[in-house]
Image: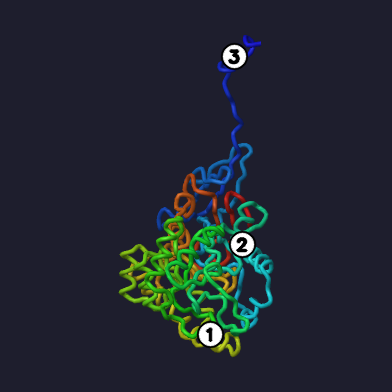
């Protein structure tokens, strides 16, 4: 028996080993924004094997037997879009939105998030940062999408945001003291350095990808100030230092200057909204490599709704009217100053699926279409720390690819009508 096996082994080494060639998917793109330059390439073939880009070739390459060809010769193809500020489990709908915490259960939030996730993916956004939910529902949704039993974008989520007592993300705001729950680090309310560290570790335990704090007042919370600083320096440093230990980045909701200044100095990764930033803040952000996520669309939305009697509570309405209109100009000056910008909308304030309306607002404020697309691809991937797998159309990157009919450099508003969506090598819209 031993001789027979030896002879068989020898004979096998003399025979050529042949494997059937794996079928590829070829995308024939009339134009391509690859993210590797600010120029569009004409007539490009993107070769995809499994869930990754194998190559990006000039011209329309012929298919081999078994290959699949996707004809996008009338379209501009680009990396999957990335929105760095969404809230998938909510959508602002006027007065009823403020009653939902009394009427909805955890399952209601989760199922609604799944619906909005599908809408977001259909709009061409294959990756999002979810910056705050109510019951860790987007952590569960992220897992469901990753395992294939829900459909939506790739989610990086903070779970529950972190605030101080009475701060922008304190879930007990606006309640009678007879109803007000006892909230602490688990619910995202901290006071002092020890509780700040505990809140970060709790989110790590819950499975959050990153941390979000509300360093100043906010527009839509039932609290008086929309811009006062709400964390002390020692609390901010405790959050950032602890987050770094767990390899988590820190995103910061901030409108007022002092809150931004404290947060940037503490070493956070991004400032969201940033309404009252000035030249001093610009220089501080550039010196620290801090990203700015503008959310112009949310500002426009709340400014318009503030004109409607009864849409917002009376405590919220003047904040929306004052802060909302300023964000586009804040973006314009930050961009001109050279601050790093990553695309973000705060969708959930405005309607999910309308995310791409942000592009036109960015271009209207002075950004080129190429830079606007870069903010939602290359820059967003950099902010997330995933530039090795996402953000450009290059070999070995994940096959997250979207397309629009026409040329977005000529008309950026066509980004609002994405006609093709591929995520992780799977076509979800064509």
- As drawn, the label of residue 316 is 1
In terms of sequence position, does the residue under pointer 2 or pointer 3 come before the other?
3
Give me the C-alpha separation between circle 2 and circle 3. 54 Å
Residue 237 horizontal side relative to residue 83, left or right = left
Judged from this view, the residue extending furthest toward the top is: 3
Residue 379 in percent (x, y) is at 43, 60
Q: Is residue 406 visible?
A: no
**Residue 292 found in image quarter:** bottom left
| Quadrant for the N terminus in the image | top right
Q: In the structure shown, which secondary structural element does the residue marked by tag 2 occupy?
A: helix
The residue tagged 3 is 11
Mark 2 or 3: in front is 3
**Is disc 1 surrounded by few (<14), some (14 to 19) or many (20+) residues within 10 Å?**
many
Q: Which of 311 and 110 is in front in this view?
A: 110
N-term mark: 1 or 3: 3
In the rendering, at what x and y percent does residue 331 appear? 41, 73
Residue at the spot x=61%, y=50% of the render?
426
The reply to whether the C-beta atoms of the residues labelled 2 and 1 are less than 8 Å apart is no
Task: Give 311 or 413, whichever is nearer the viewer.
Answer: 311
Which disc number belongs to residue 122? 2
- Please indicate, yes or no, whether residue 182 appears anywhere in the rendered image: yes
- For marks 1 and 3, give the CA distance: 81 Å
Q: Are marks 1 and 3 in contact (CB under 8 Å)?
A: no
Considering the image in quadrants, where does the C terminus appear? bottom right
Q: Where is residue 36 in the image (x, y as percent from the top left)?
A: 42, 53
User: Relative to 382, is 215 above or below?
Assistant: below
In this orientation, which residue lies closer to the viewer: 238 or 97? 238
């Amino acid at each position: 028996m031993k001789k027979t096996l030896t002879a068989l082994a020898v004979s096998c080494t003399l025979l050529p080993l042949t494997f059937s060639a794996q079928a590829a998917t070829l995308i024939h793109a009339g134009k391509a924004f690859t993210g590797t330059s600010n120029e569009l390439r004409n007539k490009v073939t993107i070769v995809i094997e499994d869930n990754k880009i194998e190559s990006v070739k000039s011209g329309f390459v012929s298919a081999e037997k078994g290959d699949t060809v996707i004809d996008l010769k009338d379209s501009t193809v680009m990396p999957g879009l990335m929105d760095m500020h969404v809230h998938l489990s909510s959508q602002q709908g006027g007065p009823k939105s403020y009653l939902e915490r009394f009427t909805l259960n955890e399952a209601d939030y989760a199922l609604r998030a799944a619906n909005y996730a599908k809408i977001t993916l259909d709009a061409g956004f294959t990756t999002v940062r979810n910056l705050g939910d109510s019951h860790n529902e987007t952590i569960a949704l992220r897992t469901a999408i990753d395992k294939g039993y829900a459909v939506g974008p790739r989610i990086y989520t903070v779970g529950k945001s972190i605030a101080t007592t009475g701060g922008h993300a304190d879930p007990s705001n606006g309640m009678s003291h007879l109803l007000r729950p006892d909230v602490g680090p688990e619910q995202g309310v901290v006071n002092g350095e020890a509780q700040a560290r505990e809140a970060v570790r709790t989110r790590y335990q819950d499975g959050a990808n990153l941390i979000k704090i509300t360093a100043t007042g906010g527009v839509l919370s039932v609290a008086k100030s929309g811009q006062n600083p709400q964390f002390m320096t020692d609390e901010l440093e405790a959050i950032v230092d602890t987050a770094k230990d767990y390899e988590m980045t820190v995103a910061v909701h901030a409108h007022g200057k002092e809150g931004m200044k404290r947060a940037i100095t503490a070493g956070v990764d991004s400032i969201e909204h940033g309404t009252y930033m000035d030249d001093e803040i610009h220089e501080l952000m550039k010196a620290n490599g801090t990203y700015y996520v503008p959310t112009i669309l949310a500002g426009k939305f709340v400014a318009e709704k503030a004109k409607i009697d009864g849409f917002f509570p009376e405590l919220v309405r003047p904040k929306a009217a004052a802060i909302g209109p300023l964000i586009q100009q804040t973006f314009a000056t930050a961009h001109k100053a050279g601050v790093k910008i990553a695309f973000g909308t705060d969708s959930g304030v405005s309607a999910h699926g309308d995310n791409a309306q942000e592009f036109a607002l960015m271009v209207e404020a002075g950004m080129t279409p190429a830079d606007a697309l870069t903010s939602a691809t290359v820059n967003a991937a950099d902010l997330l720390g995933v530039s090795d797998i996402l953000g450009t159309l290059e070999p070995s990157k994940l096959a997250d690819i979207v397309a629009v009919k026409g040329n977005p450099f000529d008309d950026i508003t066509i980004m609002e009508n994405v006609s093709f969506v591929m995520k992780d090598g799977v076509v979800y819209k064509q």
